[in-house]
Amino acid sequence: MLAWVLQPRIEPWEQTATVTGDVPSGVAGWDREQLTNAAIILQAGADLGLSDRDRTIAVMTAMGESSLIVVDFGDDAGPDSRGLFQQRTGWGPYEVRMDAYGSAVLFYQALDDVAARDGMAPTIVAHTVQVNQDPYHYESYWDDAVAVVAALDAAQIAVEVAPA
């Protein structure tokens, strides 16, 4: 018997998140601010019903794009890129791209469209979503992402999602 599971639809401009509890002071060279943003990314993925692998890919991607910091500047390739995932204007409104939870939702919505991603290398999945110039740009962040996700999963923290 086939069963269809529908992913919940989250409107990223309608909510934001805050983290409370014992966020680690550091994991694999990433500091508390960066880990707080990673926790928000993980919560957005959990809220959308995505797998642990997908959530780890999202953390890896944000590591490679912004060092897990919500940045308000782009680069030569994307001067309008903003936020954790360095999303350009076409991804959504500035306010959403600059919100950790909102930008993660935008990333996950695009990630969910990548067919057969479970059979792809994590860096190739990230590249397919982000269209980075170098498809292997994210590869060096995978082990850190795995360590950060494990540490945050074990931490006594709560991520509260509320209307923006």
Image (cartoon, rainbow, N blue to C red):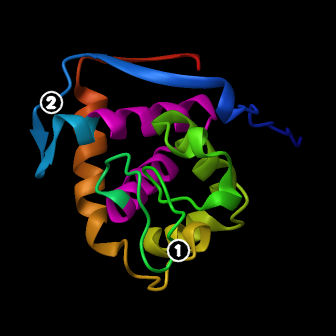
Whether residue 112 is in magenta: the answer is no
Whether residue 51 is in magenta: the answer is yes
Instruction: Give the quarter of the image for residue 25.
Output: top left
Q: How far apart are marks 2 and 1 (CA)?
A: 29 Å
Q: Residue extending furthest bottom?
A: 134
Amino acid type at circle 2 is Pro
Q: Is residue 144 above or below residue 38?
A: below
Task: Count all numbered tags in the image, as a single digit.
Answer: 2
Residue drawn at (49%, 85%) of the image:
133
Which quadrant is home to the N terminus? top right
Q: Is residue 158 above or below residue 126?
A: above
Measured from the top left, where is residue 84 in percent x and y?
42, 50
Residue 25 in view of the camera: yes
Q: Residue extending furthest right?
A: 1
Q: Is the residue under label 1 in contact with that under label 2 (CB below 8 Å)?
A: no
Q: Name the residue under label 2.
A: 24
Q: Mark 1 points at which residue?
A: 127
Name the magenta segment's main secondary structure. Answer: helix
Q: First in sequence: mark 2 or mark 1?
A: 2
Residue drawn at (85%, 39%) of the image:
4
Residue 50 in view of the camera: no
Q: Give the range drawn in magenta.
A: 36-65
Measured from the top left, where is residue 46 in percent x and y?
54, 32
Measured from the top left, where is residue 11 in percent x and y?
72, 32
Which quadrant is home to the C terminus? top right
Secondary structure category for the residue under label 1: helix
Q: Which of 117 and 61 is in front in this view?
A: 61
Q: Is residue 124 above or below residue 81?
A: below
